[in-house]
Image (tube, rainbow, N blue to C red):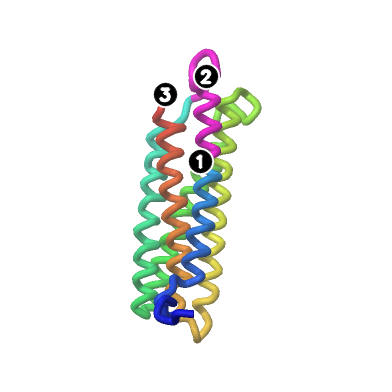
Amino acid sequence: MDTAAVAPAHDRTPVLTVGAVVWLASELMFFSGLFAAYFTLRATTRGDWPPAGVDLDVVTSGLFTLALVGSSATMALAVRAIAAGQLVAFRAWLVATLALAGGFLANQAHEWSTLGFSVSSHAYGSAFYVMTGFHGLHVAAGMLAMVLLLGRSGSGRFGAAEAPAVEMVGYYWHFVDVVWVGLWATLFLLK
């Protein structure tokens, strides 16, 4: 065996990174399927799309979309802080990210409770609730991961060495934010 052809162990991509990329690729396929279903329903449904009675608050949802996009910035700052060993700053930025995400989910819950259509009203209602519901679950999962990181940060051993794990949560969070921008544009803006 030619040992010169084998890369040294330190040049290999970390398993955590490979796992995160594969997992995010599977999430991308999942959401791609939801978008495909939406556009198929839209193309095959006769009549208006969205149907009469669908009145979405584009302005309020747009403001909460900006909050969610802003949470990507606070998450990036949390990653940068932990990589620099700044534990207090890491916690502050992670709490800011959680607050923005919590506001987004609260708005989604309010929106769901006040809409004039349901999941069983028509094809648009089904697509709307399934797409926003699965995205909301992903936001909640990201928030849970952040809470777990905050909990771990209370141990005396949490520091810059934990940056790769925080970075993976950050990648997931940025993915969730980008997906929402696509969902918001599709559901709220595209008529």
**Residue beneath label 3, please?**
191
Query: x and y percent of residue 71 in the render?
Result: 39, 56
**Residue beneath label 2, please?**
51
| Residues at circles 1 and 3 in contact by the CB criterion of under 8 Å | no
Which residue occupies 43% across, 67% down? 167
Query: x and y percent of residue 116 in the render?
Result: 56, 26
Q: Earlier in the sequence, mark 2 or mark 3?
A: 2
| Residues at circles 2 and 3 in contact by the CB criterion of under 8 Å | no
Task: From this view, report whether residue 128 is shown above or below residue 138.
Answer: above
The residues tagged by marks 1 and 2 sit, at their Cα atoms, a distance apart of: 23 Å
The residues tagged by marks 2 and 3 sit, at their Cα atoms, a distance apart of: 10 Å
Which residue occupies 37% across, 61% down? 74
Quadrant for the C terminus in the image: top left
Instruction: Using a 10 Å C-alpha cutoff, classify the residue at mark 2 as few (fewer than 14 neighbours), some (14 to 19) or many (20 or more).
Output: some
Res 51 visible? yes
Highlighted magenta segment, given as a residue range: 33-54
In front of the other: label 1 or label 3? Answer: 1
Q: Amino acid at mark 2?
A: Pro
Front in this rendered view, residue 94 or 38: 38
Determine if the magenta segment contains residue 37. Answer: yes
Q: Amino acid at mark 1?
A: Ser
SS category of the residue bearing label 2: loop
Q: Earlier in the sequence, mark 1 or mark 3?
A: 1
Which residue occupies 50% across, 52% down? 25
The residues tagged by marks 1 and 3 sit, at their Cα atoms, a distance apart of: 20 Å
| Residues at circles 1 and 2 in contact by the CB criterion of under 8 Å | no
Instruction: Using a 10 Å C-alpha cutoff, classify the residue at mark 3 as few (fewer than 14 neighbours), some (14 to 19) or many (20 or more).
Output: few
SS category of the residue bearing label 1: helix
**Residue beneath label 1, please?**
32
Q: In terms of image quadrants, where is residue 46? A: top right
